[in-house]
Image: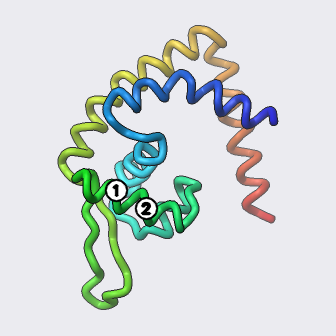
C-alpha cells in the first residue's frame, strides 16, 4: 500500500499538467517511452509503460486516431509493427517538459533534494532486485 500511496500522491501533482494537454496518463507514458527510446514494438511499449498488452492495443489505436503515434509494419515481417511519435507528440513533449520539470523542482524544494535522490536510488535498487528474480 505504501508504494501505491506514494505513486498516487505523485500523480496528484502531475495529472493536472498531463490532462491540461488533453492526454491520459497512459498516453503520456507511451509518449515518454517513445521519446526516450525511439520507435518500439507494442510489446516493448507495454513492458516499459507497465500497461497490459490488451490495454495497449486500445491505447495505441486511440493515439493513432488522435495523430499522436504512427504505426508501420516491418518490411521483413508484416506481422510486426513499429510505433513512433508524430510531430504533434513531439510538440506535446516540448510543451509539457518545462511544466513537469518545474513541478519536480517544487517537489525537491518541499521534501528536500536528498530525499528525492534517496527515493530514486531505493526504487532503482528495488526494481533491479525484482528483475533478477
Relative to residue 125, is residue 98 depicted above or below?
Answer: above
Q: Position of residue 99 (x, y in %)?
A: 37, 22
Q: Residue at x 80, y 65 (%)?
A: 133
Residue 53 placement: quadrant: bottom right
Left or right of 118: which side holds 55? left
Is residue 21 in view from this perspective? yes
Q: Secondary structure at mark 2?
A: helix
Can you identify the residue that label 2 sits on? 58
Q: Residue at x 48, y 62 (%)?
A: 56
Can you identify the residue that label 1 sits on? 62
Q: Position of residue 14 (x, y in %)?
A: 49, 26
Is residue 85 in view from this perspective? no
Q: Secondary structure at mark 1?
A: helix
Mark 2 crowdedness (10 Å alpha carbons): few <14, some 14-19, many ≥20: few
Q: Residue at x 42, y 17 (%)?
A: 102
Report the front residue among 100 and 115: 100
Amino acid at each position: 500500500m505504501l508504494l501505491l500511496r506514494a505513486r498516487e500522491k505523485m500523480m496528484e501533482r502531475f495529472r493536472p499538467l498531463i490532462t491540461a494537454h488533453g492526454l491520459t496518463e497512459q498516453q503520456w507514458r507511451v509518449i515518454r517511452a517513445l521519446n526516450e527510446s525511439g520507435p518500439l514494438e507494442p510489446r516493448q511499449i507495454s513492458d516499459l509503460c507497465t500497461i497490459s498488452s490488451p490495454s495497449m492495443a486500445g491505447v495505441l489505436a486511440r493515439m493513432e486516431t488522435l495523430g499522436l503515434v504512427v504505426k508501420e509494419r516491418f518490411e521483413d515481417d508484416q506481422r510486426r509493427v513499429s510505433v513512433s511519435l508524430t510531430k504533434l507528440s513531439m510538440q506535446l513533449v516540448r510543451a509539457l517538459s518545462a511544466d513537469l520539470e518545474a513541478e519536480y523542482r517544487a517537489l525537491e524544494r518541499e521534501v528536500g533534494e536528498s530525499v528525492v535522490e534517496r527515493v530514486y536510488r531505493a526504487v532503482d535498487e528495488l526494481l533491479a532486485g525484482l528483475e533478477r528474480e
